[in-house]
Amino acid sequence: MPPWAGAVIGIVVLIAVWWLVAVTFFRVTGSVPTPWQVAQHLAGALVDPIYWSAIGATGGAALWGYVWGNLIAFVLAFLVLIAPWFDGLATQLAVVCSCIPITAIAPIVTLLSHPGSRATSIFLAALSVIFTTVVGSLLGLRAASPTQLDVISAYGGGRLTQLVKVRLIAALPSIMAALKIAAPAAFLGSVLGEYFLIGVDKGLGIMLLAAQASANPVSLWTLALISGGVAGLAYWVIGLIGRLVSPWSSGEAR
């Protein structure tokens, strides 16, 4: 079978199971709408500027959090290489960022920010990517060939020269893989952050709250599909960039 056949079969089976569950177990309550109902609502949402405005607001906060979170992660990873004694502290900080309860930290950030600010969404988006990028960056930066590092040392180069000349190039595949995984995580963090915002009326998280309050399952499922589609698109774009900047990692080098 061609490579795309498995994905198509999986999607068809998933839609069939979804339809079966909707018309059997939830036929009376309607809590799970049929795929056709969601598809009709989604078609209308894609031409509605309100939805595009919400996607732009949530995506903008996710992008800012993605940038800041990855910058922090890169700084921690590079400090470990330049000062190896920093390894334990950097790893602990990354683990704390991964394990800290979002529902506990988000209200605190909301109280510290002024009404109308998207600081909570940006903060949770940044928090969601730090651990992934730190681990991926350290794994990649340590993948350099010892022989190449010895050559740099033999010619009088230090840790910084090793980092620039060898480690960064060897680390590109792992770093891009970490960035690819971090992109959907940042978008999810941005959506969750909108559940705690004050004085903000735009965003997918705001629309999810409104659909939940009005008990509108079709709108909820549509918004869930839109969120998944945007996160998947971000994953695909970063993966495409990764194949362009490090083609040797996917066997495309010439």
Image: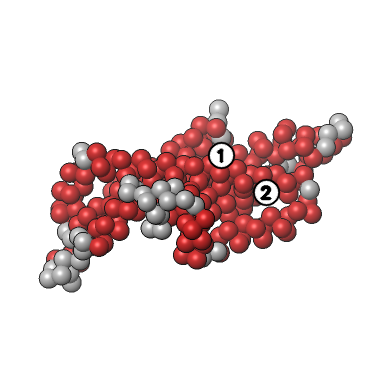
Left or right of residue 175, residue 9 in this image: left
Q: Amino acid at mark 1?
A: Ser
Can residue 189 be seen?
Answer: no
Q: Amino acid at mark 2?
A: Leu
Work out whether mark 2 precedes mark 1 in sequence or the reverse, and give the earlier one: 2
**Which residue ends up furthest to the front in the rendered image?**
114
Find disc 2 in the rendering and name its residue: 76
Where disc 1 sits, the SS reads: helix
Q: Where is residue 97 shown, x and y percent of the image?
A: 58, 58
Where disc 2 sits, the SS reads: helix
Labelled pair 2, 1 in contact (Cβ < 8 Å): no
Residue at 70% x, 39% y: name it: 167
Q: Nearer the viewer, residue 204 or 28?
A: 204
**Which residue ends up furthest to the top in the rendered image?**
254
Q: Where is residue 38 shown, x and y percent of the image?
A: 19, 53
Determine which of the numbered discs, if any, sits on residue 249 in the image: 1
How packed is label 2: few (under 14 Cα within 10 Å), some, or many (20 or more)? many
Residue at 56% x, 35% y: name it: 246
Left or right of residue 16, residue 191 in this image: right
**Which residue ends up furthest to the left in the rendered image?**
28
Quarter the C terminus occupies? top right
Q: Where is residue 11 shown, x and y percent of the image?
A: 28, 53
Can residue 38 be seen?
Answer: yes
